[in-house]
Image (tube, helix red, strand yellow):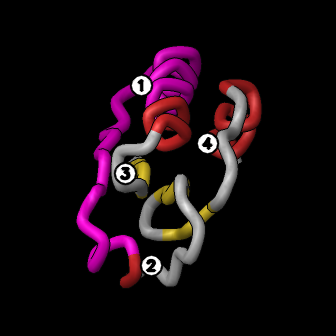
Amino acid sequence: MKIEILGTGCTKCKNLEEATKQAVAKIGGFHEVKKVEDIVEIMNYGVMSTPALVVDGVVKSSGKVLSVDEIVTILSK
């Protein structure tokens, strides 16, 4: 599973990245977590509000910081 955190480096983006890493550790297995800060790449996803969580190329959330449990739920689907 490829997981991307889209954001320019703001506090909310960093919080989502940390929560995502905790969620990945909780579910186990190998999952690539990548931070995307390039504004052009972010715009290519059609995201207007960061932070955003992208799983296997599909935007799952944007504009809010998800909890670890919310991320686990998204990754488990």
- Residue linked to disc 2: 45
Residue pictured at 29% horizontal, 45% vertical: 34
Q: Residues within 10 Å of mark 2 (few under 14, many from 20)?
A: some
- Residue linked to disc 4: 75
- The CA distance from mark 1 to mark 2 is 26 Å
Q: Earlier in the sequence, mark 4 or mark 2?
A: 2
Mark 4, secondary structure of its residue: helix
Which numbered disc, 3 or 2, marks the residue closer to the eye? 2
Kind of residue indicated by mark 4: Leu
Q: Is residue 60 above or below residue 41?
A: above
Magenta segment, which residues?
Answer: 17-42
- The CA distance from mark 4 to mark 2 is 19 Å
- The CA distance from mark 4 to mark 1 is 11 Å
Residue pictured at 43% horizontal, 69% vertical: 57
Query: Percent x, y for residue 49?
Result: 59, 67
Verify whether residue 23 appears in magenta.
yes
Mark 1, secondary structure of its residue: loop
- Residue linked to disc 3: 2
Q: Residues within 10 Å of mark 4 (few under 14, many from 20)?
A: some
Residue pictured at 48% horizontal, 35% vertical: 11
Which numbered disc, 1 or 2, marks the residue closer to the eye? 2
